[in-house]
Structure formats: structure tokens, C-alpha cells
Image (cartoon, grey):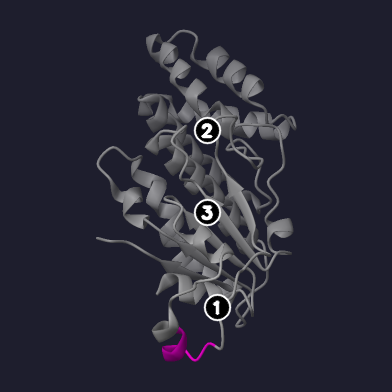
Amino acid sequence: MPSWIAESSCVHVPTIIIDPIGEFTGMLKENKGMEKELTKFKIDRPVAYSFAKVFTLDDVGIQFKANLLKKPDLQRDLLISDADITALIISQLVGDERLRDIIRESLIEIWQEGKEGFEEFIETVRAKAEKRRTAIKLDRLVQYRPLMSRGIFSIKDLLEERLVIFDLSSVSFTDSQKLMIMWFILKELLNHFLAQPHSDELKALLVCDEVHRFYGPDVPRNAAVVLENIVKQGRAKGLGAVMISQR
């Protein structure tokens, strides 16, 4: 059923699918042998959505630009709130929430200086935390370095496409890395729409599969906040959401 929703919506509005297990890439092929379903939904013939833009993960890395350290285009109050949530997530990835304040201060500092790279961030945090024994834990962030590139991830460009699928089924990334990639995409999408005027018209639809992963026991506690805020705040800006879970 979720694929039918996505197939129907992308005809009318840009549709972005977060696909952790690679289910939705089947939309790129004709669904032959489904005559009953086609009749039920009054579809004349199988359709291949070959126009979809698909982003994947592989053994080389993330096949799109991603930067957890990117300064969001938000008003100051929302900017500080975003820095605080991002700092909490990163501190939990590090394994020590006592570094949260230092990470938040470092984020705001590199934003003010126009620096958004991994090296500048780590250098700034280490300088502020040099007298703490827990600073050694910052080495744990190296595995998330692919999520802290200098490239620009443009939601505006994505919304120029009719259908975008983020296929995150690669075995080259851990579940925690995939979760942070999902979190990053959703955060960027929400921040983009928060900067837009109020809209009673649907501007885009998000389809997010496997949302229960955000509520797992080993997941940073605030990771699910972005999902909940998309539902609470996104719709007033024209962002619709379909959340899919087996739980």
C-alpha cells in the first residue's frame, strides 16, 4: 500500500522516500503479474517510474552530499534550538552527554566563522575539551565522518524532481550510521519547510519507512524529535508525511 501512495503522489507533488531496506526501488520497474491490483486501483497498465532520482550508499561512501555540521537557514531562535538538538545527538554518538555544551558552543562558533568541515569542528571541540578526560571519546566520531562533508545538500534541488528515493540498504554502513543519515535528511527537509511561509496546499510528500528504528534502545533519544516535528510543524508549511512501521 505505501508504494501505491508514493506512485500516486509523485504525479501531483514532489515525493521523497526514505527507504532503509531498498523496498521502493521496485518502482523503477513495471509491476507485471499484478492484474488484480491494477484492476482494483483502476490502473490501465503497469508503469515503470524510471524518472525517479535514486541516491544510494555503497562501499565508496554516501552518494549524495551530507553535512551534519551545516548551518541551517533559520531564524536565530530556531538556529540555537537546532544547534542544541544536533549537539545532543552528536554527544550521544560520542557516548558522553557531558560534552553536549561544548559541542553546541563549537557548532555555533564554526557557523559564525563560516566553517562547516569535520576538521574545523573536531579541532574546535578538542580545544574546548582539552582538560577533560572524556575528550578521547571524540575519536568515535570518525565513523560518522562521511556525514560531515563540505558539500551542500540542497532540498530545493530535490524538490525539482518528481520522485526521489534514498535507498539506504547498503551493507557497507552500520545501522547507527544509516539512522544518522536518515535523521540528517529529515532534519534538512524540515528546516527547509520551516523557512517557508504558511501553506494550506500540499507542496511535497515525505514517505519514511521503518520509523520504529528511531525508537530503538540504542538510538540517541532525540533522534525521533525530527520525525515528530515534521508531523507537528511540517503540514502547516505544505509538507505531508506518511510514516511506515511494522510496530
**Res. 236 mark:** none
Residue 97's quadrant in the figure? top left
| Labels 3 and 2 touching (C-beta < 8 A) | no
- The quadrant the C terminus occupies is bottom left
Residue at 47 percent across and 43 percent down: it is 85
- Name the N-terminal-most of marks 3 and 1: 1
| Labels 1 and 2 touching (C-beta < 8 A) | no
State the SS at label 3.
Answer: helix
**Res. 46 mark:** 1
Is residue 41 depicted above or below 190 in this figure? below
The answer to whether residue 130 is left or right of residue 225 is right
Three-letter amino acid code of the residue under disc 3: Leu
Q: Mark 3 vs mark 2: give the one in front.
A: 3
Give the extent of the magenta segment. Answer: 38-43
- Name the N-terminal-most of marks 1 and 2: 1
| Picture coordinates of residue 169, whole percent (x, y) | 45, 45
The answer to whether residue 38 is left or right of residue 244 is right
| Picture coordinates of residue 221, whole percent (x, y) | 33, 43
- Name the N-terminal-most of marks 3 and 2: 2
The answer to whether residue 8 is left or right of residue 115 is left
Residue at 38 percent across and 38 percent down: it is 175
Q: Quick one: 222 or 158, which is closer to the camera?
A: 158
Circle 2 packing at 10 Å, graded few (<14), some (14-19), many (20+), is: many
Cα–Cα gap, marks 3 and 2: 20 Å
State the SS at label 2.
Answer: helix
Residue at 61 percent across and 16 percent down: it is 123
Cα–Cα gap, marks 1 and 2: 50 Å
Cα–Cα gap, marks 3 and 1: 31 Å
**Res. 104 mark:** 2
Name the residue that disc number 3 marks: 186
Q: Is residue 84 magenta?
A: no
Three-letter amino acid code of the residue under disc 2: Arg
